[in-house]
Image (cartoon, rainbow, N blue to C red):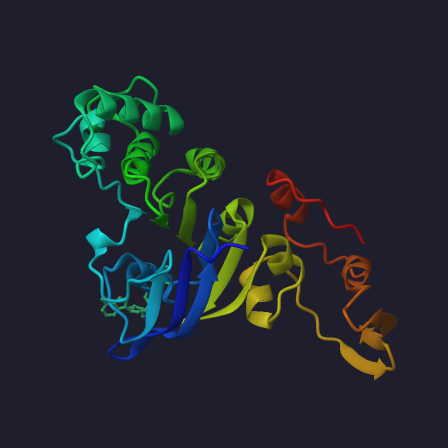
Amino acid sequence: MTDPILKLEHLHKRFGRATPARDFSMTVERGEFFTMLGPSGSGKSTVLRMIAGLEYPDSGSIVIDGRDMTSVPPWDRHLGMVFQQYAIFPHLDVAGNVGYGLRRENLSREETASRISELLTLVGLEGYESRNVNQLSGGEQQRVAIARALAPRPAILLLDEPLSALDEKIRREMQDELRSIQQRTGTTFIYVTHDQEEALTMSDRVAVLNEGRYVQCDRPEQIFHRPRTPFVARFFRGCNLLSADLDAQGEEVRMTLAGESLMIDRRGGARTAAWWRCGARPFRSGPLLRRRGHRQVTG
Ligand SMILES: Nc1ncnc2c1ncn2[C@@H]1O[C@H](COP(=O)(O)OP(=O)(O)OP(=O)(O)O)[C@@H](O)[C@H]1O
């Protein structure tokens, strides 16, 4: 088992009355697609900005690839960043924009051209080198921004709601493409979104944030089928929460719901069946998890 690529330990950050990070600790493994998901104001962007070095924590530490980076400036952290706004340079063509990411690499002209061409192929813009960026669609501009951020082979690529300005169809396509780019390059991605479906579809693991803490950090199918708190369950709109009485009897628990009783084991073994019997089939669980190759859970 290799060391995690990122370790956040007891991060705390306050802005006046807002506390977007409270004793926040988490680890991200090498090559993971890791997503921070949560409602507006839960602290996702602040945590991402602290990883990037765009904000400094009041206390706690940030270790990237084994080095303490807590007070290191952003340009020495060897991270890439992609934001919601397509932060590309309007006065440079596509090659100029992607090449900007290579300016510290000391490459020859030929090596730079070859790397730009490789990156454009990776993001599906093969042959776009001399195109004017102002004439590209939103999705294409975001691909240029991703190629530029990946150009110096960052240890981690940080993505803050990169698809939220795109229309639904392009957004869906880009979700699949981003996942594929991440897998082909093996780069660790840390992704911020408030979109539940996006998080579940793309990620290896998801941290659900609320008020500066994460309330659950797990694989998508665990988050979806085994929410640890009512907050997580409610956050996936369409999920039905029903109150039941539980009565422990040795290894089994009797659950009484709407006058019906059911024995479940202590790990909640029959819980899925119970939800099914109540007609509370989870929101889009089949197509959602099938899209990323998960087995559908049956009752
Ligand atoms: N630079 C800042 N100055 C003052 N308050 C801030 C600053 N940055 C963030 N906050 C506050 O911290 C809280 C968390 O903000 P943050 O942007 O991290 O949340 P978020 O989960 O990313 O939300 P959103 O999805 O709306 O972007 C909010 O109450 C916000 O107003």
Q: Position of residue 164 (x, y in %)?
A: 37, 46
Asked if one can make out residue 14 in the rendered structure from this viewpoint, the answer is: yes
Q: Is residue 257 left or right of residue 189?
A: right
Q: Reply above or below: 97 against 188.
A: above
Q: Quadrant of ligand 1?
A: bottom left
Asked if one can make out residue 211 in the rendered structure from this viewpoint, the answer is: no
Q: Nearer the viewer, residue 188 or 208?
A: 188
What residue do we see at 49% from left, 38% from top? 183
Q: Which quarter of the picture shows residue 287? A: top right
Location of the N terminus (image quadrant): bottom right
What residue do we see at 77% from left, 68% from top? 268
Q: Which quarter of the picture shows residue 192? A: bottom left
Q: Position of residue 77 (x, y in %)?
A: 26, 54
Q: Is residue 101 left or right of residue 193?
A: left
Q: Position of residue 40 (x, y in %)?
A: 38, 63
Outermost residue toward the left? 91
What residue do we see at 82% from left, 76% from top? 256
